[in-house]
Amino acid sequence: MLVLGETVMVLLDYIQFLISGLTVGSTYGLTALGFTIIFNTTGIINFAQGEFLMLGGMLSVFLLKFLNLGLLPAVLLAIIITTCVGALIERFTIRPVQKSSTINLIIITIGISIFIRGVAMLLWGKDTYALPSFSGDTPLSFFGASMHPQSIWILSITLVLLCLLKFFFARTIYGKAMLACSFEKKAAYLVGINVQRMVLFSFMISALVGAIGGVILTPLTMTSFDVGILLGLKGFAACILGGLGNPFGAAAGGLILGVLESFGAGIVSSAYKDAITFIVLLLLLFVKPSGLFGQAEVERV
């Protein structure tokens, strides 16, 4: 009986690790989706993606607590503002130098990240902020494990976003035009697609997805001016894990990364939680550089 009781306790712990991993992994997946959307349209890695998550969370807190808006208006307005920031970044920093080399454009996105983080620190300081949970803080029982209600919001919203993006890219004219730009920009231009507009849309959608990720995660993990650094790096790792350029592989990579991180923190030590992400990334780059769900590129000569 004692052995059976210990086995049940271990199983409950594993279920708890799984729930926590899927919750945080959903946010990594949304961040990875933002990376993929911009990469598919422009061919560059936007290292300011993590700052979109930070802005979503910080703006929500500011609008709620300092301007006394309700939770829903504050969240919606924060998402809209962050989406506009994504558009401004493309219009005034990427478009003027769009003919530069890819590495120069990537360096520009790193500079944008540092700039946004500095402005956020000046505006809101170095304090940590939190949003109230969307539906209370009373834990829910899930197969004997404890589940925060906000976890259901995170998982549900992530799933809805994935379905909407799937529909957008597969069924709408703008989504198909963005995919055409990802395959061959010159050919897309020749058939009448406004490539610059598609790049603008990619930054806006990426900022939108990032802001939503920041908003839904803030009630669980809180936010500050510098949370975007680590979230961005983990989102990039998830993007590589799932296969760069594969939107749903990126989302799956985020979930896998979150689960591995949660089990590693619970079984080994929470001190190594962040290191696990980058250990997995390095191992994958050695074993399968194209990612778990990516296809190796074939170059004709």
Image (cartoon, grey):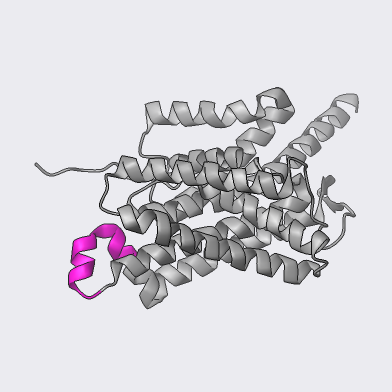
Give how far across and how far down residue 71 sits, in percent.
79, 66
Q: Quadrant of residue 125?
A: top right
Residue drawn at x 25%, y 52% as measured from the top left = 99
Establish if 168 lies above or below 262: below
Front residue of this view, candidates 41 and 100? 100
- Residue projecting furthest to the left: 301
Q: Quadrant of residue 74?
A: bottom right
Classify residue 283 as left or right of residue 73: left
Classify residue 183 as left or right of residue 89: left
Quadrant placement of the N terminus: top right
Front residue of this view, candidates 160 and 125? 125
Residue drawn at x 36%, y 77% as measured from the top left = 173
Q: Is residue 119 magenta?
A: no
Give how far across and how far down residue 131 sits, in percent.
79, 55
Establish if 244 lies above or below 280: below
Give how far across and how far down residue 87 sits, in percent.
47, 63
State whether residue 47 appears in this view: no
Q: Which residues are magenta?
A: 178-192
Q: How many marks?
A: 0
- Residue projecting furthest to the front: 122
What main secondary structure does the magenta stretch of the protein show? helix
Residue drawn at x 83%, y 57% as measured from the top left = 132
Give how far across and how far down residue 37 sits, in percent.
43, 57
Residue drawn at x 33%, y 42% as measured from the top left = 104
